[in-house]
Image (cartoon, coloured by chain):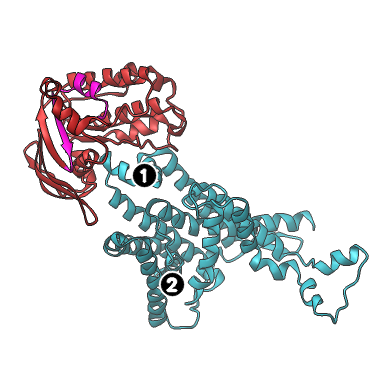
Chain colours: A red, B cyan
Amino acid sequence: MLNIKNLNAYYGKSHILQGVNLIVNEGEIVSLLGRNGVGRSTVIKSIMGMVKTDGSILFDGKQIIDLPIHQISNRGIAYVSENRDIFPDLTVYENLELGKKNNNSNIKWDIEELFDLFPNLKNRINVLGGVLSGGEQQMLTICRSLMGCPKLIMIDEPTEGLSPQMVNNVEKLLIKIAQKGVSILLVEQKLTIAFKLSKRLYVMGHGKVVYEGTPKNIKENQSIIKEWLEVS
Amino acid sequence: MSLEVLVFIIFNGLLYGMFLFMLSSGLTLIFGMMGILNFAHASFFMIGAYLGYQISENINFWIALIFAPMLVGIMGAMIEKYGLRNIHKYGHIAELLFTFGLFYIIEEMVQLIWGKTPVPYKVPEILNFPLIEISGMSYPAYSMFRLVISLLIFLAIYRVLAKTKTGLIIKASLTNPNMVAALGHNVPRVFSNVFGFGCALAGLAGVLAGNVIGTEPSMALLLGPIVFVVVVTGGLGSIKGALVASIIIGLIQTLTISMEYDLNSLINYLGFQIDINSTINHFTSLTLSQLSPIVPYILLIIVLIARPRGLFGKRDV
């Protein structure tokens, strides 16, 4: 579904991503691991067309590099940013409405289905996004992305700063999303969550993919964890 | 002050306020969405007035009322699409300089086409009569027509922003245009449309006011500062702020222009006297009506000191 080859990304004169290769298959949860600043979020932003890039990004067999952000989104890719980026002056309902779009995805979500997953959002439908708790805002951004019925959803640090209960809710939601056939590209720093949810993992260091494997492979390879993931 | 006079002042204040709103609502939306402080905004008002005059001369006022704002809107959208959008990557200073240059280009073009002297743009005959006459004062039918059109425009903007998906996209783009694009909405097109719509509103204000305040090449320069006062006082990017600030400035300016009180009357009331030959008398004898033009700027300073983001603004000036 998503096939990235030799992706380079730049912030001004800084060469951030240096030849990243990555694949996400249909209905798969793939995690991008690595320490802060190695370029994990930049991979997602590059796919979304928010960063100056070169290389190849094929989605459903078609090149999407250099397309404008909205066209990439309309191909069936959703992006949940690290900052959540809800619209604070719009209500929960209005935030969800903005997520709706027409694409050719076979995986459909409707508002009631999302409310069944998060009754809290239903209770707060007319509340402004800006007054929701961090966890509720996270739920809202994920649900807003799902309203567009994406084929691939890219989520940056979804459990950052959330309570254990909320982390649990996010995990359940991600499993449910994948069960419906939506692919997930997850940027996650909590190894336990990434190991539990992902089918495959990529470890990044210095703007490159330094290791690729299954959770089992990585757990068995302590040198990778020590060199690229552990924070001393 | 009699009740009749007060009613007339309120009507005139509302009229002036709604006129300012029509001019400033577009400017504040453009700033809120794109971060562009469009120096040339009042120039689109001037083009509206000139096109209103030209079309009225050649065809009639009603055709001008519809087509002149449309032409100004298309012109604005083109300038955004082929000018500002290409300059965007160089930052806001470049955009500001672009609109600054545009202001002068438009002024020169207007002078080349229509000359340096005012053009005889007249109020349409059918509306050129006093609608209300009380105690020797009259309220022209054309003023009431302008007030009604302004109110209708406000209701239309309110309805679009509050009740439609386009309104949602515009409001969301005010805070985070990149995320709106990531949700699949064509934000550059929305920017062009909002820029064009804002310019069309300024053009409409020009068609409606050009035949009252006079259509001449310096009209953009004269009106530009007050529009910025409205936008900054109301809060950059806030439509509600633009409305409230427009009405407040409209009412205060109309009220003060009809008041002949000066500081000397207060000093006399308190039992003191100012020598009429003294230097200080030059200042204390100034009447409120003489000070009226600077009242909006005093309001701006007070608002900025008390509330730097303006009345309803969410970002710093």
Chain under disc 1: B
Where is mark 2, residue-wise?
B50
Relative image position of residue B151 (x, y in whole percent): 53, 50
Q: Is residue B124 visible?
A: no
User: Front-most of B300 and B202?
Assistant: B300
Q: Residue at x 32, y 55 (%)?
A: B192
Where is mark 1, residue-wise?
B176
The magenta span reads A188-207
| Between marks 2 and 1 in the image, the one whose residue lies nearer the viewer | 1
Quadrant of the frame with the N terminus of chain B: bottom right
User: Front-most of B36 and A8?
Assistant: A8
Q: Secondary structure at mark 2?
A: helix
In the image, taking residue A218 as reference, residue B73 lies left or right, namely: right
Residue B65 on the magenta segment: no
Relative image position of residue B3 (x, y in whole percent): 77, 54
Q: What amino acid type should be assigned to the residue bearing mark 1?
A: Asn
Q: How far apart, in angstroms, are the residues tagged by discs 2 and 1?
A: 37 Å
